[in-house]
Amino acid sequence: MSVSYGNDDKTALQAKFDAQKIAFAPIMFQAALSLRNLGILELVKNKRKGVKIEDVAKELNLSVYGVKVLLEAGLSLEMVKVENDLYKITKTGWYILCDQLTRVNMDFTQDVNYQGVYTLEDSVKEGKPTGLKVFGEWPTVYEGLAHLPQKAKESWFAFDHYYSDYAFPEVLPIVFKNNPKQILDVGGNTGKFSIQCASYNPDVKVTILDLPGQLNVAEQNIEENGFSDRVDGHPINLLDHSKAFPKGADIVWMSQFLDCFSQEDVLQLLKRSNEAINPNGRVYILETYWDNQEFPASTYSLHATSLYFTNIANGCSQMYHTQDMLNLIEKAGLEVEETVENIGVSHTLLICKKK
């Protein structure tokens, strides 16, 4: 069934105004970030009756000129308003300053994407993450993750973990409903999910499949949490499709993982997952699908995140449409047994069995 997205219902004047927002978006993003990072927005928030430019400059030891141009930009960004020379914070300004989701997304944009995305056109033409070269010469961000500059690394993991941290507590009762004994955590990263599984169920054993560099971090976290006897690592290049996954799993778990790969690679990963599970085993896929979001802001964010994959991560993956994944699941010899929606911030869990 064909489904339509988007509309063209704006007036010409509104459309032209929105076009100017796009035209100056990179500059105004930096203005918003400066208002936050320099403490201007915090000071304005705390002055409930409003505050003058000169007083902001004096308290923060900044020039009147610098505060003036930023706060005036903040007016157009609708982060502040001014009445009788007194600046006050708006709801949008409050979210920029205080909302964790917004902070995580802004830091990810600034520290991971901003410099590299200048070459987005090249990424589209070449099918390579051309923006990654601002950090180093790696084929994908995953090989270089452990070597990123500290701030970029912190923002990358904060972005990745923010979404999964909300989802994991909700999915654990679902995962352990049938008391699985052996779980493969494919692309387990720092071991967060595996550690939570071991903490949730005292009998389960979990094997993390990931690159050696990532496993080093995961194994340290596992040891610190006292689960080395039940959680281990299996070093593997997940893109080498000649390498089979360990057999005998009750569950193959993939969280925020398949969006990191092209559709061709997703198909092969699903086939290898199918081969790894027991006859009555299941493949669990936890992802955010842009067409399956409750709020337009979520869809907007996911479309932007797809461009991170294009320019920084690997040049070939994205935040997928639900039907893209369903088609690949079927081709891999699996079928969706159950769908659980509205998990965490914006996730959908697909529970798959062998056909």
Image (tube, helix red, strand yellow):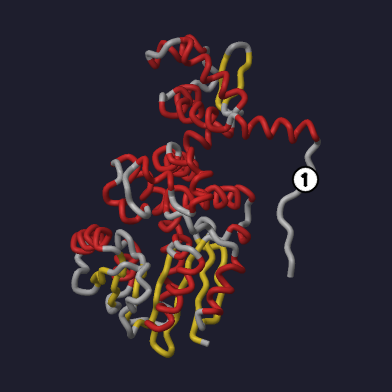
Q: Position of residue 244 (x, y in %)?
A: 33, 79
Q: Is residue 302 left or right of residue 138?
A: right
Q: Secondary structure at mark 1?
A: loop
> Which quadrant of the view contains residue 269?
bottom left
Using the image, determine if residue 297 lies above or below residue 54: below
Q: Is residue 342 at all visible to an observer of this figure?
A: yes
Depth check, front residue: 195 or 73 = 73
Of all residues, the one furthest to the front in this rendering is 126
Depth check, front residue: 128 or 160 = 128
Depth check, front residue: 177 or 74 = 74
Residue placed at 53% from the left, 33% from the top? 94
**Dot 1: within a 10 Å radius of its alpha carbon, few (fewer than 14), some, or many (20 or more) residues?**
few
Tell me the amino acid under the disc marked 1: Asp
Q: Position of residue 251 (x, y in %)?
A: 39, 79
Q: Mark 1 — residue?
A: 8
> Which quadrant of the view contains residue 12?
top right
Residue placed at 34% from the left, 65% from the top? 188
Using the image, determine if residue 176 lies above or below residue 4: below
Q: Position of residue 141 (x, y in %)?
A: 36, 52
Q: Is residue 32 left or right of residue 77?
A: left
